Amino acid sequence: MIIGVVGCGYVGLSLAVLISQKYEVRAFDISEEKIKNINDKKSPIKDTELEEFLQNKPLNLIATSDKEVVYKNSDYVIIATPTNYDIESGSFDTSTVEDVIGDCIELNENATIVIKSTVPLGFTDSIRKKYKKRDIFFSPEFLRESKALYDNLYPARIVMGDTTKKAQIFSKILTECSNLNPNEISLINMGSKEAEAVKLFSNTFLAMRIAFFNELDSFSEIYDLSPEKIIAGVSADPRIGNYYNNPSFGYGGYCLPKDTKQLLDNYQSIPNKLIKAVVEANQTRKGFIVESILKKNPKTIGVYRIIMKEGSDNFRESAVLDIINDLIQNDVKLILFEPLIFDDYFDGIRVIKDIGDFINQSDLIIANRLSNELENVIHKVYSRDIFREN
């Protein structure tokens, strides 16, 4: 059996590596640099397990920018291309997914297409009708950035937006390539719309949880209380749990901002308060953080890292970017320390390459996530990171 994977981001590459342990996998990407790295057994993404597997495991994997190599003769084609939320249309931009489906059907009409990209409610049914092809189904991914392969090796559940034999075979491929026994994995089959909804509701719930503990932290800061002690007391209740409760500048990253907005758009004719509040709460939190920073009247604010969390190389939808933009609107002088930026300026902000110089030039350092690099100057640091966890 041959498996094609389109898109070598953290979703696509982790699936390609996972499946290539036991099957022939051909991965497509438009980035020649990514392709070269993968074929040289180097991970283009910061992910410990991906790096280790590519370097040390006997994988049956090739990466290419040739569509024919990937589509022709593939039994399954997995689509893992990005779908950003388009504010004007109020929906995901699914153009890359649609392009891949069109190319795949043109080159190999017999391939079963598995959509892993997050899509709007009803997308899969509409694309089946458009191409008059039944063998297209949606299977949501639940992967953490920088832990994507680990999450595929130890899946909490596998959801299939289909109940056919081909969907069952694909479930078996994922389970047998994981490190768990099949009876340890929850396999859940449903219709495509239900599977699309599972993805959106799952991420919106996680965003809601982050927003809740962020607002608990705002409350604690205003009333001069210990958020750490309050969170410990609240989270000790097993119905609530001690996870996803570390305050931050706001939720961000690849999934939560776009998925919450997409779900809210589906509620336009449905009474709701909570889903709308999850979206609005994130902006409110970032506004509160900016006000708290400005109250300290710093002359020069040092921004320590733009990445959302430790071990990440992703700036996408980082809450820190909104904090920066709001501070710029308030005519505050900013400098930036971000080792992943090699230019001297980022959006007009001077990038300081040496951590010592950065610390010395900063009156106040803001950090979404703390680091040992700031340990000796913690008196200069404004952060809401309590538990030193992502």
Image (cartoon, helix red, strand yellow):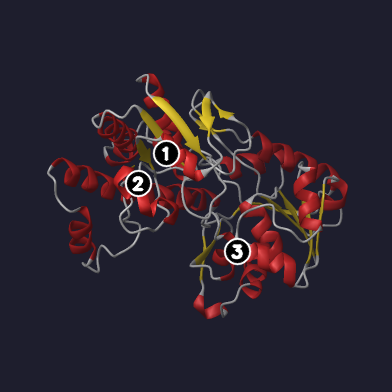
Mark closer to the chain start, 1 or 2: 2
Q: Quadrant of residue 381?
A: top left
Does dot 2 land on a helix, a strand or a loop? loop
Q: Nearer the viewer, residue 204 or 299?
A: 299
Q: Mark 3 or mark 1: which is in front? A: 1
Q: Which residue is mark 3?
A: 48
Which residue lies at the image location 35% right of the left edge and 46% below the top edge? Answer: 248
- Amino acid type, mark 1: Asn
Mark closer to the chain start, 3 or 2: 3
Mark closer to the chain start, 3 or 1: 3
Q: CA distance from mark 3 to mark 2?
A: 24 Å
Q: How many marks?
A: 3
Does dot 3 land on a helix, a strand or a loop? helix
**Rendered-image quadrant of the C terminus:** bottom left
Residue 239: x %, y % from top left: 24, 66
Q: Which residue is mark 2?
A: 248
Residue 361: x %, y % from top left: 43, 34
Q: Quadrant of residue 296?
A: top left
Q: Is residue 169 left or right of residue 25?
A: left
Q: Which residue is mark 1?
A: 360
- Amino acid type, mark 2: Ser
**Classed neighbour count for the residue bearing mark 2: other residues with Cα under 10 Å, few (<14), some (14–19), many (≥20):** many
**Vertical arrangement, residue 126 with respect to residue 1, above or below:** above
Q: Nearer the viewer, residue 54 or 332?
A: 332
Q: Mark 1 or mark 2: which is in front? A: 1
Do the numbered discs 3 and 2 sit on residues whose CB atoms are within 8 Å?
no
**Classed neighbour count for the residue bearing mark 3: other residues with Cα under 10 Å, few (<14), some (14–19), many (≥20):** some
Residue 82: x %, y % from top left: 62, 41
